[in-house]
Amino acid sequence: MSAEATVSAPPKAPIWGELRYSAELARLLADDQLWRRRPADAQPVMLIPGFMAGDASLAVLRGWLRRRGHPVAMSGLLANVDCAERILARLEKQLLTLAEETSRPVVLIGQSRGGALARALAVREPERVAGLVMLGSPVRDALAVSRPVLRTVRWMARLGDLRVPGLFSTACRDGVCCAVFREDLVAPLAPGISVVSIHSRSDAIVDWRACLEPHGEQVEIDSSHCGMSVHPGVYRVLDRVLSAESPAR
């Protein structure tokens, strides 16, 4: 389920830092500047949630984007725990549908594992992707995570090995099933795609070094891992990226 390990270290930030989510959300909701409406002719956006999360985890971000006038497509995931290739097959169809319905390339925004999936999607469909934003996504080493999360990953992989439906397996890390996905995580991205990876040194779930995308802009904020989808600093970056996107490419 990951690219070849290049970081192999758990984050050093204390886990209690993840309790900042509510404060981060409160600051976002109180920021009137970020909630101003934008012109209706806005770039289509597709959202992909993080590991073990579903589309509901990105509800605030979806509402903000729709308020700006963006057509928004969700991943359709109740929980992001399946084999990466099986998820990508579904995401690719949704990307093509959104691009065709709007007659425009799409901006992909993914949180954590969702960002890694978004990156692979951008590599495979460069003509249909205008931009890529990854929020705390360990694209350089998917297992550079906290020990509790790593234990959960291994436990779920064992269930996948037992053929529990809808779960990745240990073969997804080094086996044939996700070999192309692993290649996509290190492949160059098309020059026409604007790429931004956002990381936080106080992320207690993912080691920030694993989020440093070498083929795009790297932006640091001070955020919890889970709170990146509601952090005002992230929304300012998104505002800049989305405002810079032209109606068509």
Image (spheres, rainbow, N blue to C red):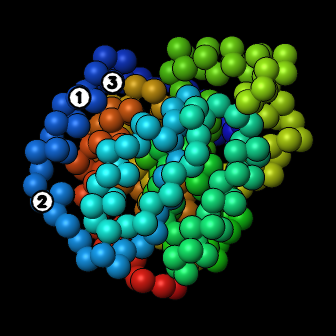
Distance in Å between CA atoms under marks 3 and 2:
25 Å
Residue 186 in view of the camera: no
Q: Secondary structure at mark 1?
A: helix
Residue 19 position by quadrant: top left
User: Residue at horizontal 55%, vertical 63%?
Assistant: 215
Q: Which residue is mark 1?
A: 22
Q: Residues within 10 Å of mark 3 (few under 14, many from 20)?
A: some
Q: Quadrant of the N terminus?
A: top right
Kind of residue at badge 3: Glu
Residue 18 - label: 3
**How many neighbours does mark 1 have within 10 angstroms: few (below 14), some (14-19), or many (20 or more)?**
few
Is any atom of residue 150 visible in this view?
yes
Q: Where's residue 163, x and y in %?
A: 84, 21
To which residue does mark 2 refer? 33
Q: Residue at x 52, y 85 (%)?
A: 249
In percent of width and height, residue 150 lies at 60, 20
Q: Is residue 103 left or right of residue 172?
A: left
Residue 99 placed where, x, y %? Answer: 58, 72
| Left or right, 17 with reference to 185 | left
Residue type at numbered disc 1 = Ser
Relative vertical location of residue 185 with respect to residue 66 in this rendering, above or below: above
Instruction: Tell which tag, 3 or 2, sits nearer the viewer.
Output: 2
Q: Position of residue 63 (x, y in %)?
A: 32, 52
Dot 1 or dot 2: first in sequence order is 1
Please tell me which residue lies in front, 209 or 177.
177
Q: Secondary structure at mark 2?
A: helix
State whether residue 227 is above or below residue 10. below
Residue under the point 55% across and 20% down:
149
Q: Amino acid at mark 2?
A: Gln
Horizontal arrangement in the rendering, residue 133 relative to residue 229 (left or right): right
